[in-house]
Image (spheres, grey):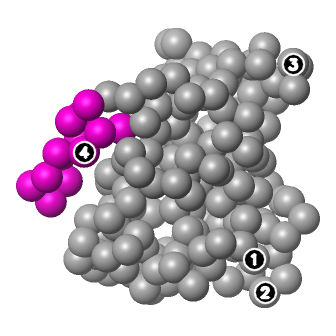
Amino acid sequence: MDQPTLQTDRLRLRPHSLSDAADLVRLAGTREVAATTLRIPHPYHEQDAVDFIASCHADADLGLSVRFAITLRDTGELCGGVGLRIEPAHHHAELGYWIGVPYWSRGYATEAAAAVLQYGFDTLDLQRINASHFAGNVASSRVLRKIGMRYEGRLRNHICKWDKFYDLDCYGILRSDRSKS
């Protein structure tokens, strides 16, 4: 699948490139970011970034995901990542995102997630998009609610990260929910 570049008022969401590797290590590699995500390891090395970028392109070619580098529209600097893990047979996807610590509390996650949500429904023709976060992650809860997702429940002790079990709060939105808001 050809992955487009999406634009918002302040952001450009584009496919990842190998030139992002150093910034991925610097931003995604912080313990604060890794602690709030399931799939970002810590420590995060350059090879992790290179492997991640390769997987983005391979999964996009198979139609299994679209993952975007979140960049500032004015400067082009990388500030995070956002994407959809797609289940084509079921017409649904899981939304995921992260923002580098220097860019927290600026609304970038909400802006990027809203653009990807729209892309998922309007271009990928998805029926449902879901997302989850570790229980207690108030910032992610706000992001998901702001983009119109509904809280659907909690999966207790669902994830083990760094030898500790965490509850996951689950959210979802249907294509039909968008016309109601």
Kindly report the distance in space between the C-alpha atoms of the residues bearing marks 3 and 1. 31 Å
- Give the magenta part as a residue range: 156-168
Picture quadrant where residue 24 is located: bottom left
| Callouts 2 and 1 close, C-beta under 8 Å | yes
| Callouts 3 and 2 close, C-beta under 8 Å | no
Q: Amino acid at mark 2?
A: Thr
In the rendered image, residue 67, in percent from the top left (x then y), is placed at 56, 51
Q: Reading the chain from its start, which is encountered first: label 4 or label 2?
A: 2
Q: Which residue is mark 3?
A: 180
- Which labelled disc corresponds to residue 166? 4
Q: Reading the chain from its start, which is encountered first: label 3 or label 2?
A: 2
Q: Which residue is mark 2?
A: 75
Kindly report the distance in space between the C-alpha atoms of the residues bearing marks 2 and 1. 6 Å
In the rendered image, residue 5, in percent from the top left (x then y), is placed at 76, 57
Which residue is more in the foreground, 53 or 141? Answer: 141
Of circles 3 and 2, the one toward us is 3
Which structural element holds mark 2?
A: loop
- Which labelled disc corresponds to residue 72? 1
Residue 33 seen from this side = yes
Q: Amino acid at mark 4?
A: Tyr
Q: Is residue 161 above or below residue 120?
A: below
Kindly report the distance in space between the C-alpha atoms of the residues bearing marks 4 and 3. 33 Å
Which structural element holds mark 1?
A: strand
